[in-house]
Image (spheres, rainbow, N blue to C red):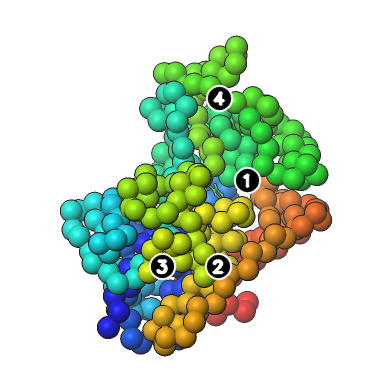
Amino acid sequence: MKRVLLIGAGHAHARLLAALAAKPLYGARMALVSPEPRQIYSAMLPGVIAGHYRREEAEFDVAELAARASVDYVPARIIGLDAAAKTATLDDGQEVHYDFASLNAGSAIAQSVPGAADHTLAVKPFERLVGELRRIAHVAIAGGGAAGIELAMALRHRGGEVTVYSERSGFPPPLARRVERALRRRGVDFRPGMRVDAVEPGPVVISGTSRQQFDTVLWASGPAPHPWLAMSGLALDERGFVQVNENLCSVSHPHIFAVGDCAGLGEAKSGVNAVRHGGVLEQNMRHLVSGEPFIAYEPDPNALMLLSCGARYAIAWRGGWGAEGRWAWWWKNWIDRRWLRRLRGEKASS
Ligand SMILES: Cc1cc2nc3c(=O)[nH]c(=O)nc-3n(C[C@H](O)[C@H](O)[C@H](O)COP(=O)(O)OP(=O)(O)OC[C@H]3O[C@@H](n4cnc5c(N)ncnc54)[C@H](O)[C@@H]3O)c2cc1C
């Protein structure tokens, strides 16, 4: 029997587990290693911070989902992966052997700016962020991507004074303009073109010649690879994510899949894309057991993006088309709640 190790309970593995719970896969012994038995769903995190959801409403039970899928759940963190030896080292010192593995451990936050690691709060892991984000009086956010701007408007909605430093926008220009209008309308102090050069105790943010003190500095500078990938022996792209082929297998070690943020694909790193990877992964896991050829992943350059704007209001964007309103928030709310119902094994139709 093939031993399959799933690393991380990211979006793709969550989709795989929900599918296995509905339609079991015989012929493989699967284990999932992931640190949080209950996990906050990223798309609803700004809603938790804005006060629209209780934390429990935005969480799913990883252990319970794995049990329904007949997958052994190990609540631990991978600290080392040896692709050639087919072993993974856990943070409790245990070594796990596998025949096949799948990496869906998300990404880290690069806090490489001087002082950032010591004086700022990274937006990941979410479980720690929610636990520590108690004082929201005067907050700076480094990073003007989807995570940074959604959190900014959520904190503003809760009455915080919020400043966003954004070196450059990763959004297409019409969407960037829409986002900037939304931030300004809500009274977020948005500083485009300003990068955070250093953070000093206080915490004090240094940006060019400006120095300003805040109660808290959140670090939302975008995805960076987990450090243990660099030592894994896997072929990595120029940013340090796993290079994969069209089947989402490592180009150097085809017995290892990489999905979600872990995969070095030329597309945005988003939960939406990670969920789509999960559909391909599910088929390929079944084909792994049946011996059929793997199917290929087809990126969707026009994937839907829904950005929440603090209150029950959102911006919708899809392939050059943009709109916004309360309806967009309710649409997002419906999609997000439907996803969690699916992971909880509840009826997905209502
Ligand atoms: C505030 C915020 C809001 C966002 N909102 C959206 C949104 O609305 N829509 C959208 O599409 N994207 C959104 N994103 C981006 C999105 O969160 C990521 O792109 C997405 O989570 C990546 O999914 P993933 O499946 O790769 O991994 P994740 O969903 O990040 O899951 C990673 C998993 O791996 C586990 N893990 C981590 N380290 C280890 C380890 N060493 N060993 C084992 N397990 C490990 C984690 O506990 C977790 O279970 C948001 C990001 C942020 C920060």
Q: Secondary structure at mark 4?
A: loop
CB atoms of marks 2 and 4 within 8 Å: no
Q: Which residue is at 49% across, 49% downward? A: 237
Disc 3: which residue: 254
- Disc 4 to disc 1, how far (Cα)? 18 Å
Which numbered disc flags the more N-terminal residue, 4 or 3? Answer: 4
Q: Which of pointers 4 and 3 indicates the residue nearer the eye?
A: 3
Percent across and percent down for residue 131 are: 40, 43
Percent across and percent down for residue 219 are: 50, 35
Disc 2: which residue: 246
Q: Quadrant of residue 8?
A: bottom left
Q: Which of pointers 2 and 1 indicates the residue nearer the eye?
A: 2
The kind of residue tagged 4 is Val
Percent across and percent down for residue 268 are: 61, 52
Q: Is mark 2 within 8 Å of ligand 1?
A: no
Structural crowding at the residue carrying mark 2, measured as other residues with C-alpha within 10 Å and reported as few (<14), some (14–19) or many (≥20): some
Disc 1: which residue: 146
Residue 132 lies, with reference to residue 118, above or below; the image says below
Tell which of 6 and 263 is nearer to you: 263
Q: Which mark is residue 196?
A: 4
